[in-house]
Amino acid sequence: MITCIGASHAQEQLPSIQWKAEAKKIDEKTYQLVFTTENRDNWEIYAPSADFDGLVAASITLPDSSIVITEPLRSSKKGEIVKSSLFDGKSFEVFTNNAEFTTTISFQSNVPANLQLNLSYTFGKKDSFYPGESTAFELTLEGGKKIESRMLIPGLDTSKPVMDCGNKSKEDKSSLLNIFLLGLLGGIFALLTPCVFPMIPLTVSYFTKHSENKKTGRRLAILYGLFIFLIYVSFSIPFHLIGNVSPTIYNDIATNVYLNVAFFAIFIFFAISFFGYYEISLPGNLANSANAKQGSGIAGVFFMALTLAIVSFSCTGPILGTLLVGTATQGAWPLTIGLAGFGLALGLPFGLFALFPQWLNSLPKSGSWLNTVKVVLGFIELALALKFLSNADLVAHWSLIKREVFFGIWIAIFLGLYAYLMGWIMFPHDSKLDKIGWPRKAFAFAVLGLTLYISPGISNTSYANISLVSGFPPPVCYSIYTIPVNCDEPLKDYDEAVVLAKKQNKPILVDFTGWACVNCRKMEENVWTKKEVQDLMEKYILVSLYVDDKQLLPAEKQQVYITKSGAKTNIKTIGNKWSQFQAENFNVSSQPWYVVMSPDEQLLTTPIGYTPSSSEYVSWLSCGLKAFEVSKK
């Protein structure tokens, strides 16, 4: 029997309330938990049976679904009955002195050596009411066993593979270039919105006409563009600071279920704003403060650039948010590169038109086409919003947004965009079109073509693998149909793979992946499906380790792990385990990440990341097999 004193949020405010917990073994897999408290200030602690219109007064939260509450939480002695003025005189059982609650739990699998749980309780006095106060405990269970998950591969030296094949540096450079181009494209879209585009001629004309001379005006306009660039790049500074907290923090942020659901709601909110039903802006006093500090000097130019960034937020915010979330798993520097592309696309036109003011005459006039761009972005935001909901669905295993459901919603969104471009539907800021121009028609037919292209995605045919959008919809195995591809295959445990590799005398191909990883899906659907790749992969024991899987580990496998740097980290979920395993052994936290190991856990080749070229991937797999033969000798 172990006694544990728990600390709670309520304890910080009310030091006299302290809970203690005891775990009493009843039989091999059954334990009684006893919670007691000293109530020195005579607070009214509500009995677990109290019901506040659906709100339970007290409960416990367990770390694993395999642990069953066989007897509900209840008070072991009688309290006193009081009438609450907060609930229209309703009577409740409360304890104004010491309280004791008990419950019985049973383990369906192995009993852990330690059990982490939370006690939630309710207390009050007169008009004070504190529902849902929580106290955390870690109890040692008599007869329980601790199963330490192996986190470090003994003797592993990542600097000395058997054969040095693999080209990580090339992949990194290509990935950074793609991120920069993505940011540049996002900036161009933002530039063409009604919040930014009309500002180009107005701002450039202001600098060139209201300065002491044209040379000074041009210099200030170029400086204005530079400040816009620097302001957007500076948005990545916090990510460089939090990167020192944990090597897996970016992946944790990007795959957090609650954050992805929040991003889904935010993007829907942004999309409706783009449709013109309301305007989104940062607090007015923020813009007024920046505007008040404008002047003719360098500081004044900086605050003019800051004012533009603030007032244009309703148009740039959603695009910028897409960029921030899209690169969040890859670290701070890729995010900086993406924001640099975005800032360059926004700031460069101001400098160029200042150097060549005659170009202003060639700019198209502001008009309804700007609102059309904004509405088109609204439809794109809807499509992107679904990706965030899909991410949450995948990592939490809700089985709501299956692959075909995802494609069905996308088809409906793009058909709506096609109908809008053809003038069949309108939004609040649209004006009736007497004639649709050929650029708009051309774009409409391009959208229709894309819709027809992704339509097989809702079918159970060989055409359902839509390579152009690989990575955005859920994996092929996540289907409403009964298909031969199973999401539970291949292996998903490294130690099991080692055992099987020794038994079959095969090398191990470790695939660090994620349910919400776009590039992982691209590799699986566009590279792994090639016959030459499949033939080589059959000669390996493939194990896929999902770093973003939010499914809880069995209680006996949960632990507080001390990293090589001495930091403490909680290993509670499957994703926690494999993300930390990757970081500890290979000093990398990006996905996909491919590692070839021998059955005796020797590194055979240089690990590689995203490799869209099937020929390069074939070459790397072939090298791994050669290295395996060398290692045997």
Image (cartoon, rainbow, N blue to C red):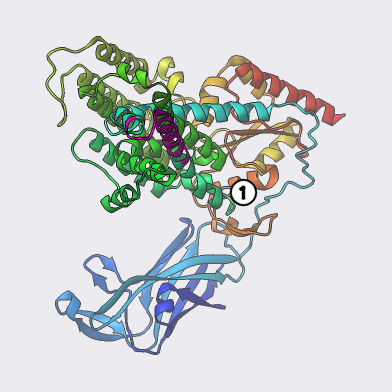
Residue occupying the point 60% across, 19% down? 613
Q: Main secondary structure of the magenta part?
A: helix
Query: Mark 1 falls on what kind of element?
Result: helix
Q: Residue 6 at what x, y percent from top left? A: 49, 75
The front one of 432 and 23 is: 432
Is residue 222 in the magenta section?
Answer: yes
Q: Residue 225 at what x, y percent from top left? A: 43, 34
Q: Which residue is mark 1?
A: 580
Residue ranking furthest to the right? 633
Q: Is residue 404 above or below residue 552?
A: above
Residue 135 as seen in the image, left or right of residue 534: left
Residue 473 visible in the shown view: no
Residue ranking furthest to the top? 438
Residue 547 visible in the shown view: yes
Q: Amino acid at mark 1?
A: Gln
Is residue 583 in the magenta section?
Answer: no
> Quadrant of the image for the C terminus?
top right
Residue occupying the point 48% across, 47% down? 253
> Quadrant of the image for the N terminus?
bottom right
Residue occupying the point 28% across, 23% down? 414
Q: Residues within 10 Å of mark 1 (few under 14, many from 20)?
A: many
The front one of 473 and 312 is: 312
The front one of 471 and 295 is: 295
Residue occupying the point 57% across, 16% down? 530
Q: Residue 533 at what x, y percent from top left? A: 62, 19
The boundaries of the magenta stretch are 209-230
Q: Residue 557 at what x, y percent from top left? A: 59, 56
State which quadrant residue 598 falls in. top right
The front one of 97 and 590 is: 590
Residue ranking furthest to the front? 212
